[in-house]
Image (spheres, rainbow, N blue to C red):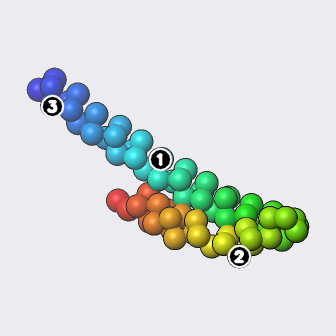
Amino acid sequence: MHGQNVLSRFIKNCYYEQKSFFSMLGVLCIAASVAMYFIGKNSSHLSELKGFFWIPLPLALLALFIAGRK
């Protein structure tokens, strides 16, 4: 009985760690996208970043979708 309780807590902890990992990944991707846009907009040397700011967004949406699942 005790072994099942430990296993159940381990599985629950892994689930919450995975959920927080994907939430953090999604937020970081959105922050990177916003930073790329504004840095590319304001800097003439890094103007290419403005053209590619959308690249992290699909990963952010996927990560937030996975984090939001039950």
The kind of secondary structure element at disc 1 is helix
Q: Quadrant of the C terminus?
A: bottom left
Q: Residues within 10 Å of mark 3 (few under 14, many from 20)?
A: few
- Give the mark, 1 or 2, whose residue is nearer the N terminus: 1
The kind of secondary structure element at disc 3 is helix
Task: Estimate the x, y position of residue 67 in percent, counting from the top left.
Answer: 44, 57
Pick the front one: 44 or 10: 44
Q: Amino acid at mark 3?
A: Gln
Picture residue at 27% right of the left edge, 39% below the top: 11
Q: Label 1 to label 3, Cα distance in Å?
A: 26 Å
Residue 62 is left or right of residue 49, and the answer is left
Task: Estimate the x, y position of residue 38 in percent, counting from the top left.
Answer: 80, 66
Residue 54 is left or right of residue 35, and the answer is left
Residue wearing tag 1: 21
State the residue lying farthest toward the front: 45
- Give the mark, 1 or 3, whose residue is nearer the N terminus: 3
- Give the mark, 3 or 2, whose residue is nearer the N terminus: 3
Of the numbered discs in the image, which one, if any, rests on residue 4?
Answer: 3
